[in-house]
Image (spheres, rainbow, N blue to C red):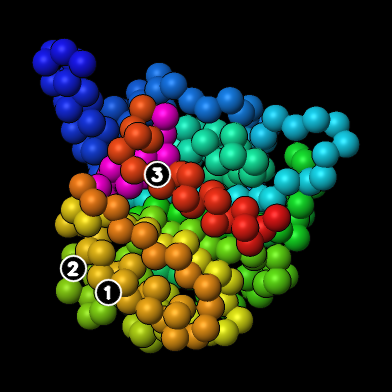
Amino acid sequence: MSQTGRLTRRISLAAIAAALTAACAPLSMFATFTPKDPAARSARDVAFGPEPWQRLDVYGPHRDKGQTPAPVAVFFYGGSWDTGRRQDYNWVGQALASRGFVTIVADYGLYPRVRYPGFLADGALAVRWAQDHAAEYGGDPARIVLVGHSAGAYNAAMIALDPRYLKAAGVERSHIKALAGLSGPYDFLPFTDPIAQRIFGDAADPPSTQPTRFVTAQSPPAFLATGDDDTMVFPKNTVKLAARFRAAGVEVEERHYPGIDHVRMVLALSRPFRNRAPVLQEMTDFLHAHAD
């Protein structure tokens, strides 16, 4: 690659990183123009609840007639619980679909309209929609995996681990076969960070907001990954949650990727940045091992 090409790539990555943090135009441009995996959006802008933000998109793998139903992945994006939209993560939906998952990318309520635990209730409703409708798109509603990055990894972990949310949404907990969390905040008491204070500060029982509290022998197996260069959500979150899984006797695959920061973790799912870390391959191998 020429010096100009390398510089352009660095500038593009910096713009995308800023967009992932601030949910601004460059991320939408990346979602529009980046090369994507061979998968089709099966449904768009589907309501999974009565609120205007409770919408999702579905991406389906290319499958031959007569094939057995595919496992289902529900993906939650990050954005500090106050930014993000599903349309900007179509490349994640297509990446997971190309790996054999009927994939749902769901929006959820954002601050200031929604605080904890409202976005978890939203996520559980999206999983309920997957349970009720995945078969219409070639998916198996009894084989669901939850996937998330950053704040979305927190959402996925809490929905998978704390039984209150799936129960309230009417989801059979045994249908959740595995969890995949990328660079997630799982153990962040006390609430000293301004983001945590405004999102979780009104919680009556702060310890009940932490995924590490809810790991039991009945928890689904987990793929937990972080980047060694992550200074936004420190790798110790992944270390602590993985330790809880091991202590409970539940299978966990803990991955630490050198040279990968918070944003590059999710970008590694995209075709342009996939050669930086084998996140997609290792994550989907783990999920298939437990959902197939």
Q: Which residue in the protein does label 2 denote?
A: 193
Q: Residue at x 60, y 45 (%)?
A: 104
Residue 278 seen anywhere in this rendered image of the structure = yes
Quadrant occupied by the N terminus:
top left
Looking at the rendered structure, the number of numbered marks drawn on it comes to 3
Query: From the viewer's perspective, is 108 left or right of 42?
Result: left
For badge 3, the amino acid type reads: Pro
Dot 3 crowding, Cα within 10 Å, few <14, some 14–19, many 20+: some
Q: Residue at x 75, y 55 (%)?
A: 141
Asked if marks 2 and 1 touch (Cβ < 8 Å), the reply is yes
In three-dimensional space, the C-alpha distance between marks 3 and 1, rounded to whole angstroms, equals 27 Å
Q: Is residue 15 magenta?
A: no
Q: Which stretch did the figure color magenta?
A: 260-271
Q: In this orientation, which residue lies closer to the viewer: 217 or 84?
A: 217
Q: Amino acid at mark 1?
A: Phe
Q: Position of residue 216 (x, y in %)?
A: 53, 84
Name the residue located 23 percent from the left edge and 51 percent from the top edge: 258
In the figure, residue 8 lies in which quadrant? Answer: top left
